[in-house]
Image: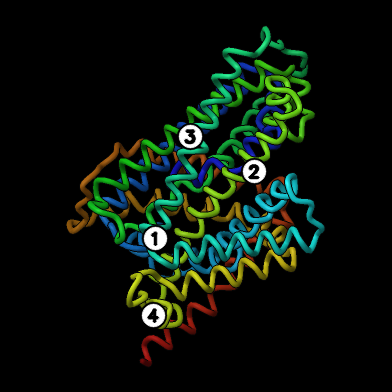
Amino acid sequence: MVAGIIIGAGIFVQPSEISRHVPDVRGMLIVWLVAGVLTFFGALVCAELSSAFPRTGGVYVFLKEAWSPGVAFLWGWAMLWSMHSGIVAAIAVILARYAGFFIPLGDAGLRAVAIAAIFVFSSINYAGVRQGSAVQTFFTIVKVLAIGVMLIGVVLIAPEPAGEAVTSSYSLRDVVLALVAGLFTYGGWHMVTYVAEETREPQKLIPRALMLGTLTVTLCYIGLNAAYVHVLPLDQVLRSQRIAADVATVLAGPSGAAAVSLLVIVSAAGALGGVILAGPRVYFAMARDGLFFRSFGEAHPRFLTPHRAILLQAVWSSVLVATGTYRQLFTRVIYTEWIFFALMAAGLFVLRRRPDYKPVFRIALWIPLIFIASTIIIVVNQIVSEPLESATGLLLVASGLPVYLYWTRRHADS
């Protein structure tokens, strides 16, 4: 689930923003590695917290325990209406676009395929976490094996290294921008914590999954980028809009484009299944806490899944696909999740002062300090680069405050 969610379509499709800011092979690979290490640190923070609070909701639960139900509610509010549902919509659209390589689709057809994909994977997850995780496991295995085949092909078939054709220099600010782009590419690592109550021995298994999953993704990302710059000159890497397809074309001829299109579909399907599985558990936890409609906190009598929350997410994500509004919501709000990540990591220092805080897995406190610093860099970079968009995103999150006050009053009255 960790690897399958993180490895989406972008790593196969577009030239990385990392190589745009750091047009140097060695520097680019170092940035990918550093971004992977920082992601691993974030996973370690989640690992400790999930070993202490192995409950459905993950980050929502951690924020509630460390700070307040209000902070946790704002996280869930932003997830439902923009961040998480926007990710579901965006991945579904990418899947549909690459399905169009094999079946011609107009704009209406593309949206219909994307919505159909959302409901197919939602139905699988509606039927049970075991079914959803089985599909997720299948797509992740296929995805990682395909990456392995591509890397082996580069070793066996590729010509001599293409070499560096870029002479541009870069500054420390460029390195920071590249690092921020890398951290976004590694996004989704925290979502496995949402299904703790449906996991056997979650105190042990979820920390292990977080660590092994992020390490697997880091190795895949570094390997893929090394393959890209081995086969193609760096200036072509920077220009390419279908980087994996261009590499596959060099290795396998025209059939390479079809192979990569299929790989992108598989990769997007795996990510879509994992994201759809994770999100409803947060809305389920909110409802159990009296911060959402009570019916959404009830599990299906047969499948034992948060069925109403799954349907709600499917319907709203489909609305975002049909209207195209997911682009604006997603791009304006997605950076705000890093504010919550910083609060989550800072919560470790608060929780460790409490005598009843007894995690099974503990980390050194310098790890969350480094992670908090990286999240501050992301937030400051976004605010400085796009102040208007940033303000809009913060207002969208803050709009949940009056709703939170309403639900707390309603819960108290009941």
* Position of residue 408 measured from the top left corner of the image (x, y, whole percent): 42, 82
Q: Are marks 1 and 3 in contact (CB under 8 Å)?
A: no
Q: What distance separates the C-alpha of mark 4 from that of mark 3?
A: 37 Å
Q: Are marks 4 and 3 in contact (CB under 8 Å)?
A: no
Q: What distance separates the C-alpha of mark 1 from that of mark 4?
A: 16 Å
User: What kind of residue is marked 1?
Assistant: Leu
The mark closer to the camera, 1 or 3, is 3
The mark closer to the camera, 1 or 4, is 4
The mark closer to the camera, 4 or 2, is 4
Q: Earlier in the sequence, mark 3 or mark 2?
A: 3
Q: What distance separates the C-alpha of mark 3 from that of mark 2?
A: 25 Å
Q: Earlier in the sequence, mark 1 or mark 3?
A: 1
Q: Earlier in the sequence, mark 1 or mark 4?
A: 1
Task: Determine the image quadrant of residue 376.
Answer: top right
Q: What distance separates the C-alpha of mark 2 from that of mark 1?
A: 24 Å
Q: Name the residue at 43% across, 78% down.
A: 296
Q: What distance separates the C-alpha of mark 1 from that of mark 3?
A: 26 Å
Left or right: where does residue 80 sit relative to residue 327?
left
Residue 195: numbered disc: none
Q: Name the residue at 62% across, 23% down.
A: 28
* Rendered position, 72 above or below 161: below
Residue 290: numbered disc: 4
Q: What distance separates the C-alpha of mark 4 from that of mark 2?
A: 36 Å
Residue 381: numbered disc: 2
Q: Are marks 4 and 2 in contact (CB under 8 Å)?
A: no
* Rendered position, 326 above or below 160: below
Q: Which residue is denoted by mark 3 in the rendering?
A: 217
User: What kind of residue is marked 3?
Assistant: Val
Q: Which secondary structure lies at badge 4?
A: loop
Label 1 Cα neighbours within 10 Å, binned few <14 / some 14-19 / many ≥20: many
Q: Are marks 3 and 2 in contact (CB under 8 Å)?
A: no
